[in-house]
Image (cartoon, rainbow, N blue to C red):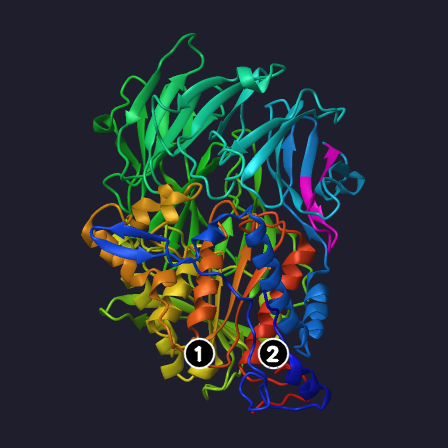
Amino acid sequence: MENKKITALVALIALGACSNPAETENETTLNYPETRKDTSVYDTYFGTEVPDPYRWLEDDLSEETESWVKAQNEVTFGYLEEIPYREEINSRLTNLWNYEKVGAPFVRGNYTYFYKNNGLQNQYVLLRFKNGESKDEAAVFLDPNEFSEDGTTSLAGLSFTDDGSLLAYQISEGGSDWRKVIVLNAETKEQVEDTLVDVKFSGLSWKGKEGFYYSSYDKPKEGSTLSGMTQYHKLYFHQLGTPQNTDKLIFGGEKTPRRYVGGYVTEDNNYLVISAATSTTGNELYIQRLDVAGAPIVNMVANYENDHSIIHTEGEQLFIETNLNAPNGRVVSTTYDKLGVEHWQDFIPETEHVLSVGTAGGKFFTTYMVDATEKVYQYSMEGEMEREIELPGLGSAGGFGGRVEDTVIYYGFTSYVYPGTTFKYDIASGASSVYNKSGVDFDPEQYTSTQVFYQSKDGTKVPMIITHKKGVALDGTNPTLLYGYGGFNISLTPSFSTSNILFLENGGVYAVANLRGGGEYGEEWHSAGTKMNKQNVFDDFIAAAEYLIANKYTTGDKLAIAGGSNGGLLVGATMTQRPDLVKVAFPAVGVLDMLRYNKFTAGAGWAYDYGTAEDSKEMFEYLYGYSPYHALTEGTSYPATMVFTGDHDDRVVPAHSFKFAARLQEYHTGKKPVLIRIETNAGHGAGKPTDKIIQEQADKWAFLFWNMGYGKLPGSKETMEKG
């Protein structure tokens, strides 16, 4: 395999040339690694043969794939190393990240716990102090930085018993969704039994001190850790002190086949609640009395189209959050002897805004989404609205939940120009006070965030929030990054990004579009971007880019697009449908092969949003038409592209990115680079060490500015544009 050669580029930089090496006649065309094509591989769908010459890259454990990954990274990092201000960006980001970060405290037993990062620690540390003592007396309880030498093993969830005496916590190695569970005596910090293994997509919920419920799949056979398809989720009960292979199957498996199964014990310890689903949207709801020996598991809701969860119990009374017959959500109540949906009574009715609910201190806290920003209200146990909680502005709030005995709770607030801040809230009085203010080096007064509404292709009004320095001239010269997601009922509400500071202080415009397929306007908005409506999502994103250009925030030569996971699909579809639209594209950990996504790990669970190629001829043709891997066209000049993925991503397997990058390099014409950056020993993103995050972000910004034609960073005193 042939590595990239950067011959003239080094000389150009040494001479201080100002022209773009990707566009000058003195530049040597990049030599990408040779990728073997197997023309004998194809699938047949409803009489149509679809070739898949790069399928061998789906075998993540083969030596050939390993060699290909190494060769691609040599090309990519060789290119990035020649960008003159890459290390300057890395240094600035490192300084920006280097401030103390402290999480909200929570009480368990005799101790108060909180997370803390001194600044550049790869993983947050869990500390604690005895109740009644000062936070200054806190000592380290769990330090994930000691879990592995390279910082890639992370703390991935924990659960204490009610009295705080026992802790079960999960660890993730290399970013994998497969977890291990360790149980500690919380007082002595001694491990009390063998480590549980092969736990996936699971919470941990204690039943007293007997043991806990957890979920997992049968692990794929050795040699197919990423390409193997997980089947049916199972809910187990682990009796403390017994071997894992004797754990009792509670629900799921072959008898009740579901792709996602979760179980949790209500705060009063009277009920086990089970959620079972065949996809990422909608779930059945089951309940079992734990205060009655031998009580059966009872099906409350046999409905896969809507989402339901029990959020609180008071004796026999149950409170349920649901979007059944209420696309924007509502809270209903019923009693254990009247579980059927026909007995449900509105407790907090549906409104025009999307609802999510938490409970604490004998109160309900309702968060309403209003045009992708949030408002929060406090309700009594009788369903009466008591007050609106005053937030610092338009943005996102979270953390409105706790235990019945809590008198105070801690919530966070953030926006694109408001660094994440923790507030202490007194439930009785409604008074909020700052508990912990961010120490990040950022002056909000220098920046502004504005929400606009633009029209998509079919006339639908779509919101977008645009953030930049105050006083930025709308002359079409600003480097701009457009970000989106548009799927799985996930809403993009405002949040602060340390990485984005680098972009904004260098004159960048950061835009986030709230596309159909998300949850910003409830289930109807979500459904408008699923299956045969998926093109709406891409049209919304393309219209957002066109709005930014038409309103002179930027031009096509200064515009980049980015998105991860389902957002990686969004970027892949946009750049293949409109390769002329933008200068730079960042598809990250993307779902890029829409004909085979359901063959890998948990991919089959995404069918509610996407449909599958096996569903019908019509569905196959629709997916085939926009699938980024298949939509690439020979002889096309695509945007400068850097594909991001992790070699251990077992959620959206790296084969998507591998195959897409291989075909992109084959078909692309012109001298704009089309590269893939493969993070080793990394997964879908969760738990990634700080040092890897910083370097990845530095590479993104360096690639963006360089391919937009900047010889120096736009914010530097000696800025000059290349070309």
For label 2, the residue is 506
Kindly check if marks 2 and 1 are in contact, taking CB atoms under 8 A apart as contact: no
Q: Which residues are magenta?
A: 114-130
Q: Residue furthest front?
A: 40
* Magenta region includes residue 106: no
For label 1, the residue is 669
Q: Amino acid at mark 2?
A: Asn
Pair 2/1: label in front: 1
* Magenta region includes residue 115: yes
Q: Quadrant of the N terminus?
A: bottom right
The answer, for residue 256, to whether it is visible in the render is yes
Q: Is residue 77 above or below residue 582?
A: above
Q: Position of residue 698 (x, y in %)?
A: 64, 68
Q: Position of residue 703 (x, y in %)?
A: 58, 73
Image quadrant in which you'd find residue 206: top right
Q: Amino acid at mark 1?
A: Thr
